[in-house]
């Protein structure tokens, strides 16, 4: 059974930093065969892609509003993917989801991801 478990969410102030992580288990043939993405969904809005990291970790993609502030990384030995978020803004408030795509580079579309976590809430106060 595949499980993606996010952790590290919470309430922070604007300008603060926060790191969230996602621990994967049960992926076949293995975690390193999956590109990993972070998505977020704010109240009343559609879920949107935040960042993607390739299965080797050599390639990353960021949505324009988080470029220069967020950093996605992965540890294939520990089956984890993380998102370091700096200079947080109130508009970053959302539920953040990690997702796994059985492809080298991932996808900008939700449909490209076969497995999803339950999400972790991040609230940034002004």
Image (cartoon, rainbow, N blue to C red):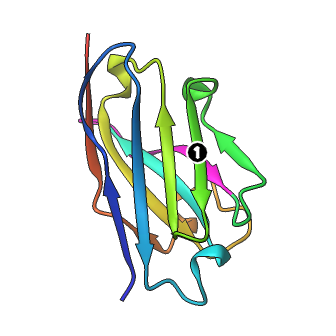
Count up the numbered dots. Answer: 1
Residue 123: horizontal and vertical position, in percent?
24, 29
Residue 19: horizontal and vertical position, in percent?
41, 39
Instruction: Classify residue 43 as left or right of residue 29.
Output: left
Q: Residue furthest front?
A: 77
Q: Which of the 4 image quarters holds residue 9? A: top left
Tell me which segment is drawn in magenta.
42-53
The quarter of the rendered structure image containing the C terminus is top left
The quarter of the rendered structure image containing the N terminus is bottom left
What crowding class fits label 1: few (fewer than 14 Cα within 10 Å), some (14-19), or many (20 or more)?
A: many
Instruction: Classify residue 23 as left or right of residue 110.
Output: left
Residue where numbered disc 1 is placed = 72
Residue 6: horizontal and vertical position, in percent?
34, 57
Q: Which of the 4 image quarters holds residue 37? A: bottom right
In the image, residue 116 above or below residue 93? below
Q: Residue furthest top?
A: 126
Q: Residue at x 44, y 85 (%)?
A: 26
Q: Residue at x 64, y 59 (%)?
A: 107
Assign a secondary structure to mark 1: strand
Nearest the camera: 22 or 111?
A: 22
Q: Is residue 59 magenta?
A: no
Q: Is residue 46 magenta?
A: yes
Residue 5: horizontal and vertical position, in percent?
33, 65
In the image, residue 76 above or below residue 38? below
Instruction: Classify residue 77 as left or right of residue 110.
Output: right
Q: Residue at x 61, y 51 (%)?
A: 52
Nearest the camera: 49 or 86?
A: 86
């Amino acid at each position: 059974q595949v499980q993606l478990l996010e952790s590290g969410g919470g309430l922070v102030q604007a300008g603060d930093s926060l790191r969230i992580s996602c621990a994967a288990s049960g992926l076949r043939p293995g975690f390193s065969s999956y590109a990993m993405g972070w998505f977020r969904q704010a109240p009343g809005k559609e879920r949107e892609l935040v960042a993607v990291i390739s299965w080797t970790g050599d390639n990353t993609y960021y949505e324009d509003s988080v470029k220069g502030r967020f950093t996605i990384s992965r540890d294939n030995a520990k089956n984890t993917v993380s998102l370091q978020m700096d200079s947080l803004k109130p508009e970053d408030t959302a539920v953040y989801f990690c997702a796994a795509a059985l492809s080298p580079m991932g996808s900008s579309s939700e449909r490209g991801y076969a497995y999803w976590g339950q999400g972790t809430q991040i609230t940034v106060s002004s």
